[in-house]
Image: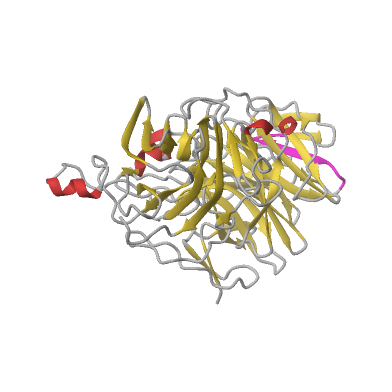
Amino acid sequence: MSHYDNPVVPGFHPDPSVCRVGEDYYLVCSSFEYVPGVPVFHSRDLVRWRQIGNALDRPEQLPIPPDAATSGGIYAPTIRHHDGRFWLITTNVHRGSFVVTAEDPAGPWSDPVWLDLPGIDPDLAWDDDGTCWCAFSGTQLARIDPATGTVLEGPWPGWTGTGLQYPEAPHLYRIDGWWYLLIAEGGTERGHAVSVARARSPRGPFEAAPGNPILSHRSTDRPIQSTGHADLVHAPDGSWWMVLLGTRPRGHTPQFHVLGRETFLTPVRWVDGWPRVEPVQPRGSTAPGGTPPAAPAEQAGSPPAAPAVRAGTPPERDDFDADTLAPCWISPRSRPAHSWSLTDRPGWLTLHATGPTLDRPGYTFVGRRQQHLDCRVTARLDPLDARAGLSVRLDEAHHYDLEVAQGRVRVIARIGPLRQCLAERSVPAGPVELVVDIRTHDVLPPSVTSAGQLAAGPVGVGPTGPDTIAFRVGTEHPDPLAELDGRYLSTEVATGFTGRVIGMYVTAGTAAFDWFEYRPGGAAGTR
């Protein structure tokens, strides 16, 4: 029997939508304030996903105000294939909902066609005669022309769920003569749920499934929580599957999730005309298409082994030898052409400062999502005349920085209104290796910044956070500069819809990065 590990697309990849074309699956996720927007993935088995591009990779497709608050931007895309083209509908909360299309899901995608519809989380579904239906949060429905953006009829109220808050993320499917309306409700936190209703026409009336919600992990001790915002897909072997978002909270109550909402997979059976959804397991059985067993899932409370690269993750190392940045690299709000270069110094990523601080929008930052609970990030930086380094961030008010400037390297923490340098030492001129280790074993209490401080006696609080983030310079210094509690870079502290992003930045002058390495599993056994 084959197995697969959840999440299938780890890290900040929420609100998944999936479609199948022949033997191929394509999946998209929300990107919020980050650019490029809407990552696009390809798979042949629903388990091993590879990012093939971003649907919104041009400024004219993705107008985000320079002062947009975190968790603004792009919400909840839906991807479908119809009449030989891929169709993607989503919402830019700063302007409205729109459609883009492509012949190749790797791109290029068209410029937006804007819709005069309210709400978020739009969906597309077609009838046999070519009629296009659009459902969106509320839950409301309309008949539209997706090629022109014209609203032909509606919107009108649909089925609004079982009475839980925030009925949203609707998807319409025509199956065996019924129109099924799948929605999320309960809010995207621990009370999240998936419910379904059906009707003979998208106009209704809808009847609710007798077992709603058909999926929820609320009030359970399951390690995967916040399950919801789902999409269904029919595999070539006749099986049905659901992709959905979920979180992996850790630490002491109320627990903290740091990677954001991730993409999970679970099987679906049809019983008496209704979908029955299996609980979402860290390790699922009977993967579609006979997927070979994946690497063991990370186990809570124990140091990770040296794992293989998990499905859904980019290559570990980028030497910046390509002509353009890989699709996994993202930046908050914008990435001006003059702020970065792969040709100024071939084989290096050169960054030019556009803002003086990471505490306010407008800075130069190029990062990638943290996708594993334990990981090590190493980058080789030539600081030149700059103030530059590595940052682990959730937003402008919640980030930890390992920064080099004027011959010194510093660990800086920004938590809410507080900003403090917690450690520093001198570094020689020239390139330097910066290291960030994130571990879920040997977690430190929040009141210390190194394990050595515990020798002074009890500190009054326990190791209750989700992880510890350690900062090092090169390999010649075995002890970290500082080790910080990870709870302050979690959604439960910072709020919002995103997750951790780890990246390179410059806030003064010009700096160059020779390579960037992200290693799953971190450095087990180092402190």
Vertical placement of residue 104 versus 46, above or below: above
Comparing 513 with 15, the one in front is 513
Choose top left, top right, bottom left or bottom right for residue 235.
bottom right
State the image coordinates of residue 150 (x, y, percent, origin top left): 82, 29
- Viewed as shown, does residue 2 lie left or right of 321? left
Comparing 214 with 475, the one in front is 475
State the image coordinates of residue 228 (x, y, percent, origin top left): 53, 47
> Magenta segment range?
129-141
Q: Residue furthest left?
A: 457
State the image coordinates of residue 143 (x, y, percent, origin top left): 79, 35
- Viewed as shown, does residue 457 lie left or right of 213? left
Colouring style:
secondary structure
The N terminus: image quadrant: bottom right
State the image coordinates of residue 419 (x, y, percent, origin top left): 36, 28
The C terminus: image quadrant: bottom left
Choose top left, top right, bottom left or bottom right for residue 46.
bottom right
Number of residue marks: 0
Q: Residue at x 60, y 43 (%)?
A: 349
- Viewed as shown, does residue 124 lie left or right of 131? left
Q: Residue furthest bottom?
A: 1
- Viewed as shown, does residue 136 lie left or right of 247? right
Q: Residue at x 60, y 24 (%)?
A: 66
Vertical placement of residue 477 versus 429, above or below: below
Asked if the stretch drawn in magenta spans residue 497, the answer is no
Q: Residue 32: in sight, yes or no?
A: no
Choose top left, top right, bottom left or bottom right for residue 342.
top right
